Amino acid sequence: MSEKLTALVIDDEKQIRKLLRIILEDHDYRVLEAENGRQGLAELAQRKPDVVLLDLGLPEIDGLTVLKRLRDWSHVPVLVLSVRDGPADKVAALDAGADDYVTKPFAAVELTARLRAVQRRSQSVEDEPVFHFAHLTIDFTSHTVAVKGEEVKLTATEYALLKVLAQHAGKVVIHKHLLREVWGPNAEEQSQYLRVYVNHLRKKIELPGKNEKLLRTESGIGYRLILPTKQE
Amino acid sequence: MGSKRLILPKPAMIIEKLGQPQSWIGELGIATAATGAVTAVSFLVAPLTGHVGIALLYLFLVVLAGLTFARWTVLFVASASALIWNILFIPPSFTIYIEKLEDAMLFAMFFVVAIALGHTTNKLRGSQLAQQQREQRTAALYELVRQAGLAHDIDTGLAAALALVEATFGVKAALLLRLKDHTLSRQTHAASSFEPRAIELAEKAFSGRDPIGRFTQTLPDADTMHLPLKGRSAIMGVLVILPAADKRFGASEKELIETFAVLIGTILERDHLLAALKHAEIVEASERLQRALLQSVSHELKTPLAAVQTGVETLTGAGSAGTNEESAVLEIQTALWRLDRVINNLLNMSRIESGVVQPMLDWCDIGELIENSIDLAGEVIKEHRISVDSDPTLPMVKLDQALVEQCLCNLLLNAAAWSESQSKITVSARLRANELLLMVQDEGKGIRLVELPRIFDTFYRGQAAKPGGTGLGLAIVDGFVRAHGGNVRAANREPKGAEFEIAIPVETLPATVMEKLA
């Protein structure tokens, strides 16, 4: 970790780029800037940043197109910056290969937490056979889940669902993706499965009380297993 | 309204009969033939009846002629009958000479009676026809008012009016209407049945206010007649009629068609005034809305901006104490949150007003929906006691979760704004038939009855509203709920407080499916 990580910011708003630079440099990133999609793609090919922050509302080539072109040849984690529109744009971006999104206006804490989660992606289950945060422990080798050290019985489906969410911990996972991973490609439209099982899962892994929420619903988009913030 | 078909029984024919007879010679021919036929019959029956009986046959012929033909024809039949009777039947036959005095008297009497009879029956028929024609005109005008004046839209009405003109007068009709800039359109109205060529005549009629062209004093050689459509205050267009080349127009027909033109003009003018009135109302409403928008939005945007500015100045100001700094940051945060909410409201409202809100229906858990809405309302409702009353066994429902969460959140914010802190706000959910009912109840001041019908209006704010707020929250609730095909209602509670209930028709996931999945 001696090497500084590089972040590429693609946004046409100068003020946003400036602001992101302040936040990112504060968190030890080296920052590259691009003010449109073409420049962004060129920077990406040349400088190979570790993470990309991409605005969806770019002039000329819009963000979604940039994302699709970029995904043709790069696996770099992409965090999408979007203004508050319907969930449809976000789902489209996530479906096209974005790793997560933040909605403008965003808080610095939220942004850096998302960035950290997005970069975790490269770590696979094999690297980390036991996953734990807050009160939850998941042992991927023995397929067991424990809450506060006590094992809870999950059905095979519940476990599969939790596993997908944990693999993307901290990041939003869209409905379609969850359904495909857990129930197979034919179940992509069967969102009712998801609601029922998320409900069951919540009852088993979440502790009573509001602040203990683990599974957050992103209305119209998907679910997110919340990573504890650093302060906790 | 009634059918658009015309119910008049061929008015054209009847009107023609009273005007100049179409074929003088034809009528004379028929009269001659009839006289001939009666003469032939008379030859057959003369041996039985004698020449006096024959006179009755001829009188009968004159009566029939009086009922059918014009006056001169009747006179011709009467004279011809008298002469033929004299020559052929009064002895000595085949001479004009009459032998006996009584026969001469009979002949004279016959002549007088025939002429008188023919004249009287002819007059009778005339008045009957005039009566019929008056009825016909009244019926035509009535039909014009009924079909054109009371039509749902002006184009249907004009089409009916033109059809009526064509059926009544047996002509082709075309309409040229006045344009918005008060000049005459060169484009004929869609209902016209021909394309008038002499546009300059129509222009003249339009500017000169008098009929021009065929059947008029001015340029009677033209093919077409041009009638200005006079309204009360302006000429609304020109009616152009194209009669067949041999068509004649009597005075009564001219009068009738001019009345038609005035009626059509009045109908057009009325429609024009109605449209102008409606437009004025819309303009006024939008101006009012714009004023409200400017007032409330500029206030709602400027207040938090001012707070941010002051806060930043405090932070950058030299020598500010630590506690001040902390509260300045807090103020800035609150102001930013408020700014964000105002902008969000404006965006949502513009989405609703431009009609682009289309709910993306998906299965959703009601308990989760309520929790998310409470989270969404955030700090504003922290001072209130929120109580959730929802059956955890409610089935899943299909709706746009993000939109409904926003609705419930707005209702919560509204409840918090109108009630004391520490008072209770209850959120409840239940299913009734195929409807999801979401209710928010507070213990606040309630809603003044006079304001009840307006609280969901865009930018409407209660008279006693606390400062801050755009008057958009409830309008957004209404818009989103409507997009779901549902409705929202407000009422007061006993002993105090208000309640808002959202009713949305939803599909539910049957309990059996839920169990199977579990």
Image (cartoon, coloured by chain):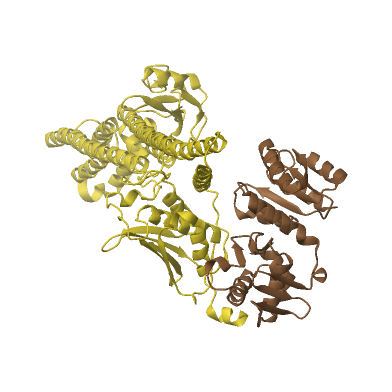
Chain colours: A brown, B yellow
Q: Is residue A190 found left or right of B329 in the rendered image?
A: right
**Is B150 situated left or right of B341 in this image?**
left
Residue A101 seen by the camera: yes
Tell me residue B378's x, y (percent): 49, 56
Task: Confirm whether residue B33 shows in the render.
Answer: no
Residue at the right extreme of this rendering? A46
- The location of residue B435, given as percent across then percent down, is 45, 68
Rendered location of residue B293, percent (x, y): 44, 38
**On screen, residue B435 above or below B195:** below
- Residue at image x 25%, y 49%? B47
Q: Is residue A230 above or below residue B40?
A: below
Q: In screen coordinates, is A76 left or right of B515?
A: right
Query: Is residue B502 or residue B144 the one in the foreground?
Result: B502
Q: Where is residue B246 drawn, in percent x and y?
A: 44, 28
- Residue drawn where x is 50% and y is 22% of the image: B198
Residue drawn at x 69%, y 55% is: A114
